[in-house]
Amino acid sequence: MEQLIRRINELVSLNEKLAAGLATALKLILIVILAYFALRLGHAVVDKIFFRERDGRFLFPENKTKTLSSLAKSFLRYFILFILLIMILQVLGIDYTPILASAGILGLAVGFGAQNLIRDIITGLFILFEGQYSVGDYITIDKYSGTVEELSFRITRLKDFSGEEHIIPNGKIEVVTNHTKGLMRALVDVDVAYEEDLTRVHQVLEDLCSELDEKFTQIKEGPNVLGVNELGSSGVTIRIAAYTEPMAQWKIEREIRKAIKERFDREKIEIPYPRRVIFNRQEKNETEG
């Protein structure tokens, strides 16, 4: 009889443990789901705040708006992750207060090898406050160049022209070259044959530059014919320069080259190219004979 009672008690205790474990698992799942929806809602609120328009314009410059939005979302993500971790510890019955009280949050982070994380966050704050670059800028960090797709407290994400993404921890950034600050220079060199009249060529190019200035709104200064830049082996090199909006310099260079080729064809101005002249020595000897 006693063995039967003991067996029943064991089964009841096992069922209670299973029920408690199931309840804990459901709580954990519910907490994770709530954290996910809180993050989604937070992102929507951030977009609503920073991408708010007034009179058809953003309250902040577009690049600054994207940067601030990205950083706010990054902060929100880490904050919700921290709260999620605290709630999970509570559900599991782990008292986290003595851990924080004995070591401190900073000591705990360093103890887990998070020095690099702290350095990344501090550097990210300096990048933001100093305005070194923003989302949408074309920059070079070390040997990596690309457009800033994301700027968070921890990382900077670049995408280059080939579509490859480069993820760089902010703490690793030492020197940054921002190619989108101010006007950019478009530079074009064109060769003409030595037989051409340089005064006429210069005038043709001046007229063409005036037309290009009116045609392309991305050109802010010029284009200007700077003059003879080099005396090459087969022709005279003339340089043309213009200042454009950020990231438009390559397009303008292509358009200038195209326009020069078409105008030179129309004006019968020769662009030199390598040629091979063959003398037939045998025919020359027969003629002398």
Image (spheres, rainbow, N blue to C red):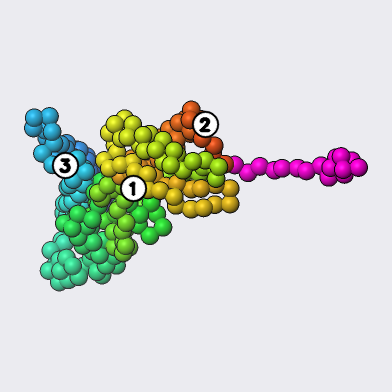
Label 1 sits on residue:
185
Closer mark to the observer between disc 2 and disc 3: 2
Q: Which residues are magenta?
A: 273-289
Task: Please tell me whether mark 1 sits on a helix, a strand or a loop.
Answer: strand
Quadrant in which residue 282 is drawn: top right
Q: Which mark is residue 155?
A: none
| Residue 184, x across and y down, in percent | 31, 47
Amino acid carrying mark 2 in the image? Lys
Residue 217 appears in the figure: yes
Give the vertical position of 58 relative to 112 (above or below). above
For the point 32% across and 62% down, the residue is: 175
Q: Dot 2, crowdedness within 10 Å: few (<14), some or many (≥20)?
A: few
Q: Residues within 10 Å of mark 3 (few under 14, many from 20)?
A: few
Amino acid under label 3?
Pro
Which label number is shown at residue 268? Answer: 2
The residue located at (13%, 33%) in the rendering is: 57
Side of 227 where 119 appears, left or right: left
Horizontal and vertical percent position of residue 12? 23, 46
Residue located beneath label 3 in the image? 61
Which amino acid, by three-letter code, is at mark 1?
A: Arg
